[in-house]
């Protein structure tokens, strides 16, 4: 375990204001809010706090940018794609600064931040390649008819971004929305607004016309709520908790029935079969739960292990957890940084106490690391039962719950016995068994002999209360265009 004393260099904070119409603005109500460094619990800076009045300003700018005669709407598809590629290039150009800014604000290991930024640039570039391939179809009709479809941009898209992958989740939403020709009002999480605001400067530098992308930092109820309720916002995309996702959908329905896509929580199963290579399986399971300090919607937080290899798997997993380097995210040796804030930190420690009281066996961890910041040691519980709180609820923290099974039919039923359905995994050398699990597990993504293998060209999203709609791949475009049918009678 490395020191939790941060060696952060002095990262200059360049942008703290609201980005509307390619200009920087103070909040209409004159309020600011503090942004906290999770490695220390100390304030980084104050950021302008957007409210309904600022959302109204952004909507006005976005409506002008989306006017049929606007520069944005008149761009050829290839020109739109070139702007996106320029933005992706600027992300790569500034990766050293951006990765430090992301780590300062979010707490993830700086090498992980660099990986996120490269992935974000790749995502924007991937969707830049789609701009001239979003095509309709011709449809057979009567002898004197021509029928065809057009795919047209929806309009003003509200996008509400989570704090666990600030830049990458922004890219997942900007990419398809821009490729389809929409305009955007983006709200970064109030915990992590700094990298998104810096991207406002890059968006302007890339040459996007004013009003196409607007960035408003602010809280969920006031700023996010204003986006969801606004009568002139045509679509909202949200990534976050189920609880808030339900409020987003309710607000969209109560206002103008705007289109909604939701990527919500998970309690994802990872099933380790008796024929699995135990060293490999333990390594995959370790990464599945502890990546990004387990602040990951797809975290493999229910690890089902066959009874024949259960004890050996526990021993291997405990060894990996005890050797995991937790500490200063600016240290190149660090694998795991802090949790995002004090409320999450306390919530996770509460779940750990629940596991102890519920009868699970604490194998390792279970306490804070260091004496400042929000660091928690990697924690493993064995003897976990399906009805325990730690096996039912999304913890969003470094807690591995290991459950035992004997029958494959039984474990599939247990794995599916959840209100969530975001991801699932299985480790086996039996291809038929792996494909059978892939068919029967109720999840938007199933990974066989891997976990969280997400790529830009493959769709990502949830079953059940893990959300609806898809991000990434060709399917991700469908959330951002309307289909218009045109029928021409030949007279």
Image (spheres, helix red, strand yellow):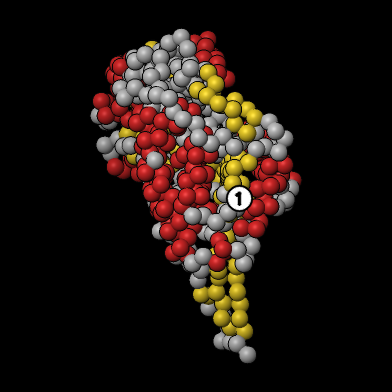
Q: Residue at x 65, y 38 (%)?
A: 26
In front of the other: 10 or 382: 10
Q: Is residue 373 above or below residue 166?
A: above
User: In this rendering, does residue 50 appear at all?
Assistant: no
Query: Of helix, strand and loop, which one carries label 1?
Result: loop
Quadrant (top left, top right, bottom left, bottom right) of the C terminus: bottom right
Find residue 48 and report its horizontal and vertical position in percent.
63, 33
Find residue 113 and report its horizontal and vertical position in percent.
39, 33
The crowd level at tag 1 (other Cα within 10 Å; few <14, some 14-19, many 20+) is: many
Q: Residue at x 53, y 78 (%)?
A: 140
Q: Residue furthest right?
A: 254
User: In this rendering, does residue 21 appear at all?
Assistant: yes
Q: Residue furthest bottom?
A: 491
Find residue 302 and report its horizontal and vertical position in percent.
44, 27
Q: Is residue 21 above or below residue 69?
A: above
In front of the other: 468 or 416: 468
The image shows a total of numbered marks equal to 1
Quadrant (top left, top right, bottom left, bottom right) of the N terminus: top left
Q: Is residue 334 above or below residue 30?
A: above
- The residue labelled by disc 1 is 21
Q: Residue at x 30, y 22 (%)?
A: 333
Displayed quadrant of residue 237: top right
Q: Left or right of 30: which side holds 155?
A: left
Find residue 17 and report its horizontal and vertical position in percent.
59, 37
Q: Residue at x 34, y 39 (%)?
A: 448
Q: Left or right of 307: which side holds 223?
A: right
């Amino acid at each position: 375990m490395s020191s939790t004393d941060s060696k952060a260099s002095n990262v200059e904070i360049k942008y703290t204001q609201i980005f509307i119409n390619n200009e920087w603005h103070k909040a209409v109500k004159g309020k600011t809010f503090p942004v906290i460094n999770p490695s220390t619990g100390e304030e980084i800076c104050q950021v302008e706090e957007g409210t309904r009045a600022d959302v109204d300003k952004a909507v006005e700018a976005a409506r002008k940018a989306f006017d049929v005669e606007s520069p944005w709407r008149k761009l050829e598809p290839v020109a739109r794609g070139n702007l996106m590629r320029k933005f992706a290039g600027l992300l790569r150009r500034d990766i050293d600064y951006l990765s430090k800014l992301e780590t300062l604000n979010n707490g993830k290991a700086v090498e992980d931040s660099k990986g996120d930024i490269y992935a974000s640039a790749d995502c924007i570039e991937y969707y830049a390649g789609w701009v001239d391939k979003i095509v309709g179809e011709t449809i057979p009709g009567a002898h004197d008819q021509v029928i065809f479809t057009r795919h047209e941009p929806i309009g003003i898209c509200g996008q509400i971004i989570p704090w666990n992958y600030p830049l990458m989740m922004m890219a997942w939403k900007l990419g398809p929305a821009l490729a389809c020709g929409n305009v955007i009002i983006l709200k970064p999480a109030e915990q992590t607004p700094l990298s998104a605001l810096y991207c406002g400067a890059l968006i302007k530098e890339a040459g996007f016309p004013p009003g196409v992308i607007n960035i408003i930092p602010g809280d969920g109820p006031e700023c996010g709520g204003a986006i969801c309720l606004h009568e002139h916002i045509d679509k909202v995309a949200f990534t976050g908790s189920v609880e808030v996702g339900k409020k987003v959908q309710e607000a969209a329905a109560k206002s103008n029935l705007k289109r909604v896509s939701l990527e919500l929580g998970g309690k994802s199963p990872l099933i380790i079969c008796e024929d699995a290579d135990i060293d490999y399986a333990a390594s995959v399971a370790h990464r599945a739960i502890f990546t990004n300090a387990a602040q990951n919607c797809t975290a493999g937080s229910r690890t089902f292990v066959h009874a024949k290899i259960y004890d050996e798997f526990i021993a291997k997993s405990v060894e990996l957890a005890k050797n995991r380097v937790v500490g200063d995210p600016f240290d190149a040796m660090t694998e795991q940084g802090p949790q995002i804030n004090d409320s999450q930190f306390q919530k996770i420690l509460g779940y750990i106490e629940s596991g102890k009281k519920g009868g699970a066996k604490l194998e390792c961890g279970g306490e804070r690391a260091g004496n400042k910041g929000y660091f928690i040691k990697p924690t493993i519980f064995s003897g976990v039962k399906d009805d325990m709180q730690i096996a039912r609820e999304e913890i969003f923290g470094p807690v591995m719950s290991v459950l035992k099974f004997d029958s494959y039919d039984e474990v599939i039923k247990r794995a599916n016995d959840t209100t969530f359905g975001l991801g699932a995994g299985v480790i086996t050398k039996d291809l038929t068994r792996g494909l059978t699990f892939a068919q029967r597990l109720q999840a938007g993504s199933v990974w066989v002999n891997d976990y969280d293998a997400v790529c830009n060209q493959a769709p990502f999203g949830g079953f059940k209360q893990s959300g609806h709609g898809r991000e990434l791949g060709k399917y991700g475009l469908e959330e951002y265009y309307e289909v218009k049918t045109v029928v021409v009678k030949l007279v």
